[in-house]
Amino acid sequence: MSASSETRPLAERLSRLGTETAYAVSEEAKQLSAGGLKVYPYHIGDLNFATPEIFVTEMNKAVGERKTGYCAAAGVPELRSAIAKTLGAARGVTYGIENVSIQSGGKPVIWKFLAVTMEAGDEVLYPSPGYPIYESMIRYLGGVPVPYSYTETPTGFALDMAKLKSLVTDKTSVFIYNNYQNPMGACSSDEEMADIAKLCVDHKLWVLSDEAYFDIVFDITAKSIVSLPGMLERTVILHTYSKSFCMTGWRLGAAVGPAEVVNHINRLNTNDEACTTHFIQWAGIHLTAPSAQDFLHNTLLPELKKRRDLIVPLLNKIPGFHAYLPKATFYVFVNVTKAMQLTKSQSLEEFRKLILSKTGVAVCQREHFGNALPSDTEFYIRFAYSGITCELIEESMKVLTEFMQQYAN
């Protein structure tokens, strides 16, 4: 290579950028399917429901009205106002248009919030297992990721508050909280949420409340930490249409929080994408339309609950499997410690690959949601039942049960 063709190395920070390794499971499943294996898709949290027609109609109408150019970086005022009113009412707080910045989905909120509130070298508390982009963005922006975890209780998953409090130092500046949690489906009790809020207030922490699954709850009323004393002025909500209205590919969401933070997020919008797709924003204004709410409450949630109530008892009949009935999200985080012992699997990844190759059941495992922690003594895989029918749930559970029974006998 001649001297004139040499280039400088690429940016060092790229080595700190993570990814979503769950997509590798999709490729693996696709290859096995092409080879003739029937695959049961539990690995990706996408939905096999059509987007409510009102959003499609209003998007097409906006295109017809030539709403295809630039708009304000903060978003269309009508959409910002609708989100402020709707989110505030559901959480018992008051938001105005100045508290809302429209985003291309929920993901951008993570890095923009961190870019505004975190200095390089700051420590950030985040859940692990949890959404892997938290840790990726903390590292990429020069922060120090400090994972906290949940423990298994007789009724589900809960935080060890004493352990969590021990992780806070004078360098901690941000707390990332994902109630109605991916991948565990964990829901904070009122006491746990109040303890978290007090911790954040006492240590003057900024808070990112990832509320992607706020509407996907069963048998309970959703609550937000933003409604607790001292939290409104320090919390940014990650809001997205992806899960509640089956719009994962539309890329529409919002950062909702203190105006001083939102104003700087809007500056990042200007420097990054300029604006979220104009005509999609006009569709989003109709999130409170009767037909949209009817879809959420009378189509989506009843069907997801039906799937949940079907799959959990079937999982608990499989040798070596143990699962709780989650009250939120469309995930079941299954303890397979005994199943791994039965199959003599040396790792979670080995176990995941075994059941995929032998049964076609495609799942994610704990390490798709952050590296295992020293405190991890049990082993888990995640089933997403958002993209599979009840008929296929029954079929796949039968196949998986029969496969595991050969090791139990």
Image: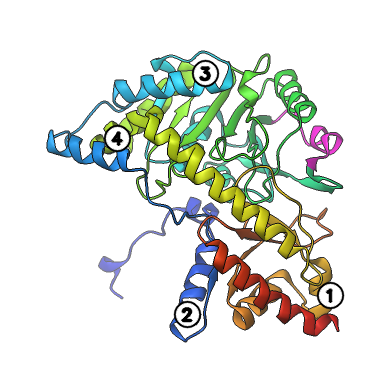
Magenta span has 165? yes
Spatial separation of the CA atoms under disc 4 and disc 3:
21 Å
Give the structural element (helix, strand or loop) at label 4: helix
Q: Which residues are magenta?
A: 158-171
Spatial separation of the CA atoms under disc 1 and disc 2:
28 Å
Viewer-side residue, 24 vs 388: 388
Q: Residue 233: x percent and y percent? A: 58, 16
Which numbered disc flags the more N-terminal residue, 1 or 2?
2
Q: Residue 93: x percent and y percent? A: 56, 15
Which numbered disc flags the more N-terminal residue, 2 or 3?
2
Looking at the image, do the residues carrying marks 1 and 2 touch, with CB atoms under 8 Å apart? no
Q: Amino acid at mark 1?
A: Gln
Q: Residue 129: x percent and y percent? A: 68, 51
Viewer-side residue, 214 vs 175: 214
Looking at the image, do the residues carrying marks 4 and 2 touch, with CB atoms under 8 Å apart? no
Q: Quarter of the image holding residue 6?
A: bottom left
Q: Circle 1 is placed at which residue position?
A: 341
Q: Circle 4 is placed at which residue position?
A: 283
Q: Is residue 348 above or below residue 290?
A: below
Q: Is residue 148 visible?
A: yes
Which numbered disc flags the more N-terminal residue, 4 or 3?
3
Q: Residue at x 61, y 28 (%)?
A: 207
Q: Circle 3 is placed at which residue position?
A: 89
Q: Amino acid at mark 3?
A: Ala
Give the structural element (helix, strand or loop) at label 1: helix
Q: Amino acid at mark 4?
A: Ala
Q: Residue at x 56, y 50 (%)?
A: 304
